[in-house]
Image (cartoon, helix red, strand yellow):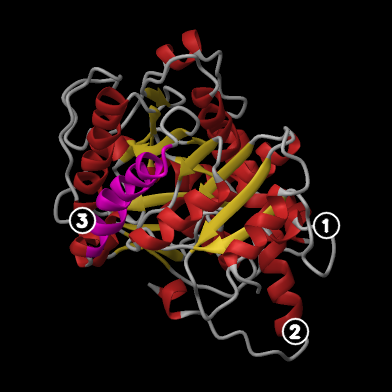
């Protein structure tokens, strides 16, 4: 890969009339969808990603036009939110019209294990980007979007949550994001930056990271149905979340930066669903009914009944390995948070009124999208396994 400054200058020389956008966290779910969305709108996009010794660009590889990874409107460079000098250099070289800060240590449970890094990247990292805009003299040119989170509400003070609901964060991740939220507001008021916070509630898709609970569930169900996994271990399945589709949510990000005045917006579907009900809906997609017995850590989910015709239509074979009464779901205290967030549901009335935003996918559409994708993925693995290839599961897949 050539140096970042070379790649940036090459992009800038092709067409100065196009809007230029920086997306941090380009290899994540939101970064991939947003890049695709902006490219379709005629933007020049540079994605910023952390250096890794492993290939991690699968979500964005299709955005390159050919095998030599050339695309006059899309490129990426290395960046870490803990590295001020690198951030300043990239902002100076690219002089973007818009910056979308989507990069973060975004796993809530992990933030309890790595609180200092989470604070540095998610909190102070946002400050570094804002300072880069100011240091480079781009206060009047560059608009800034901050990916905020419904985890700010934590121990909720009212239902549903709006832009006026008091915050009560319940994890190092949420506390770091709280700092980021207020530093964006401060720089907006102190320096006149067009900087907005998107308080996004849970948004999922087939591109969701494999360790997030929704994707963990859809992957596991596909594996269980194919006979490659026997158990699914989860934590608090009574927690309720407002789940939307990431494709809808990235549109809201762009809409915020097109407004004449910056502001902060809740983006949500307005419907809350428990993890338990999400599980039931996903299993129902493949024709499997789950029944629960027991309480707390002793609760177990087992196969109650099977719609064999639906299962066979989905997978091409009968569910002979799944009998009624088979125990599948177990509760593991390892996945409990030290401080739980029991219920989140947002009211996006402000975004709907001012931005004209509305979700185009409901929960059933989201589940169908995720299940179809993971079934296809696991069928590919099934084909490889039958061909004699060793598919040892990742340690993180087990965890």
Q: Kindly indicate whether the residue at mark 3 contacts the one at mark 1 (C-beta within 8 angstroms).
A: no
Along the line of sight, the residue nearer the viewer: 160 or 285:
160
Along the line of sight, the residue nearer the viewer: 368 or 77:
77
Quadrant placement of the C terminus: bottom left
Residue 133 is inside the magenta segment: yes
The residue carrying pointer 1 sits among few (fewer than 14), some (14 to 19) or many (20 or more) residues within 10 Å by Cα, namely few
Quadrant placement of the N terminus: bottom right
Along the line of sight, the residue nearer the viewer: 13 or 183:
13
Task: Please name the residue shown 74% across and 71% down the image.
Answer: 380
Q: Is residue 327 left or right of residue 314?
A: left
Secondary structure character of the magenta stretch overall: helix
Where 150 sits versus 297, above or below?
A: above
In the rendered image, residue 398, in percent from the top left (x then y), is placed at: 42, 75
In the rendered image, residue 332, in percent from the top left (x then y), is placed at: 27, 65
Query: Helix, strand or loop at disc 1?
Result: loop
Q: Which residues are magenta?
A: 117-137
Query: Helix, strand or loop at disc 3?
Result: loop
Res 386 label: 2
Q: Earlier in the sequence, mark 3 or mark 2?
A: 3
In the rendered image, residue 255, in percent from the top left (x then y), is placed at: 55, 23
The residue carrying pointer 2 sits among few (fewer than 14), some (14 to 19) or many (20 or more) residues within 10 Å by Cα, namely few
- Residue tagged by mark 1? 65
Where 152 sits versus 215, above or below?
A: above
Res 189 label: none
Eye-nearest disc, 3 or 2? 3
- Residue tagged by mark 3? 337
Q: Is residue 289 visible?
A: no
């Amino acid at each position: 890969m050539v140096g970042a400054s070379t790649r940036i200058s090459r992009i800038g020389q092709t067409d100065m009339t196009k809007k230029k956008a920086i997306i941090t966290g380009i290899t994540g779910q939101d970064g991939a969808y947003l890049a695709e969305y902006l490219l379709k709108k005629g933007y020049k996009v540079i994605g910023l990603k952390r250096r890794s010794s492993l290939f991690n660009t699968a979500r964005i590889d299709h955005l390159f036009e050919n095998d030599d990874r050339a695309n006059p409107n899309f490129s990426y460079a290395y960046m870490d939110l803990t590295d001020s000098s690198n951030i300043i250099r990239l902002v100076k070289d690219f002089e973007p019209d818009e910056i979308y800060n989507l990069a973060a240590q975004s796993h809530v449970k992990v933030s309890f294990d790595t609180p200092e890094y989470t604070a540095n990247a998610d909190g102070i990292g946002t400050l570094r980007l804002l300072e880069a805009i100011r240091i480079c003299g781009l206060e009047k040119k560059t608009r800034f979007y901050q990916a905020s989170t419904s985890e700010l509400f934590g121990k909720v003070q009212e239902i549903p949550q709006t832009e006026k609901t008091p915050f009560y964060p319940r994890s190092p991740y949420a506390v770091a994001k709280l700092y980021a939220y207020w530093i964006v507001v401060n720089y907006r008021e102190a320096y006149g930056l067009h900087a907005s916070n998107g308080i996004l509630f849970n948004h999922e898709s087939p591109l969701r990271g494999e360790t997030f609970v929704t994707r963990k569930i859809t992957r596991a169900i596909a594996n269980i149905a194919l006979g490659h996994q026997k158990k699914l271990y989860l934590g608090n399945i009574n927690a309720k979340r407002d789940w939307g589709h990431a494709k809808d949510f990235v549109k809201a990000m762009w809409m915020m930066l097109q407004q004449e005045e910056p502001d902060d917006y809740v983006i949500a579907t307005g419907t809350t669903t428990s993890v338990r009900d999400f599980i039931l809906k996903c299993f129902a997609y493949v024709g499997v009914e789950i029944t629960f017995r027991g309480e707390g850590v002793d609760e177990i989910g087992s196969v109650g009944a099977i719609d064999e015709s639906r299962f066979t239509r989905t997978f091409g074979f009968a569910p002979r390995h799944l009998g009624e009464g088979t125990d599948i779901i177990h509760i593991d205290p390892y996945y409990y948070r030290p401080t739980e967030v029991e219920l989140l549901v947002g009211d996006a009335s402000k975004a709907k009124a001012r931005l004209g935003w509305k979700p185009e996918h409901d929960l059933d559409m989201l589940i169908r999208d995720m299940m179809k994708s993971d079934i296809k993925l696991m069928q590919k693995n099934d084909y490889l396994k039958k061909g004699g290839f060793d598919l040892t599961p990742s340690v993180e897949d087990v965890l």
